[in-house]
Image (tube, rainbow, N blue to C red):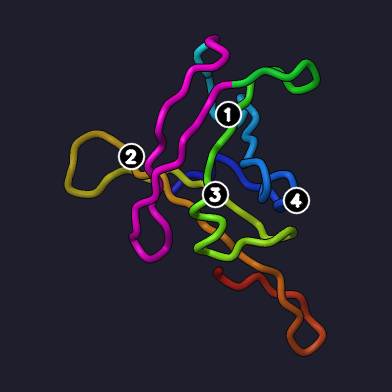
Amino acid sequence: MAMVFSKVLTADDIDNGLSIPGSSLGQLPDQEGLTMSMQVHDRNGEVWTFSCTIKRNDSVGHFLSVGWNKFVRERDLRVDDKVTIHEEAMKKQATGTWIKVEVKRKIRLFGEDIWADV
């Protein structure tokens, strides 16, 4: 399983959608405003559909804006949770990949910080 992208969530990610730099995703089409759907699987095998739009910002260049409000609400995501997107080869098929989303929350246990699944 190859990690594609990981970040600690900000209020902007929770309220306005996750922004993934184009450099994390390889070559994005140079078509600002292009919208597509991305199906991801969570740790329980549930499939989520995220609406994605290619946008451009002068400071970061092209990036993928991910609409994931339902996922945020249903998983009760919070600022400082960590989201990681992985790509994994499909089993039982010659080609294709799964996109997996993993969310962890830092909790303090016996004076130590640990990351627990959300």
Relative placement, left or right, of 8 versus 95 is right
Q: Which residue is mark 2?
A: 97
| SS class, disc 2 | strand
Q: Residues within 10 Å of mark 3 (few under 14, many from 20)?
A: some
Comes first in the chain, label 4 or label 2: 4
Q: Which residue is mark 1?
A: 64
Quadrant of res 79:
bottom right
Q: Which residue is mark 4?
A: 11
User: Which residue appears at 46% of the width and 35% of the height?
Assistant: 51
Q: Is residue 49 a member of the stretch shown in magenta?
A: yes
Quadrant of res 93:
top left
User: Which residue appears at 54% of the width and 29% of the height?
Assistant: 25
Comes first in the chain, label 4 or label 3: 4
Name which residue type carries label 3: Asn
- Residue 96 appears at what percent x and percent y? 28, 35
Label at residue 69: 3
Name which residue type carries label 1: Leu
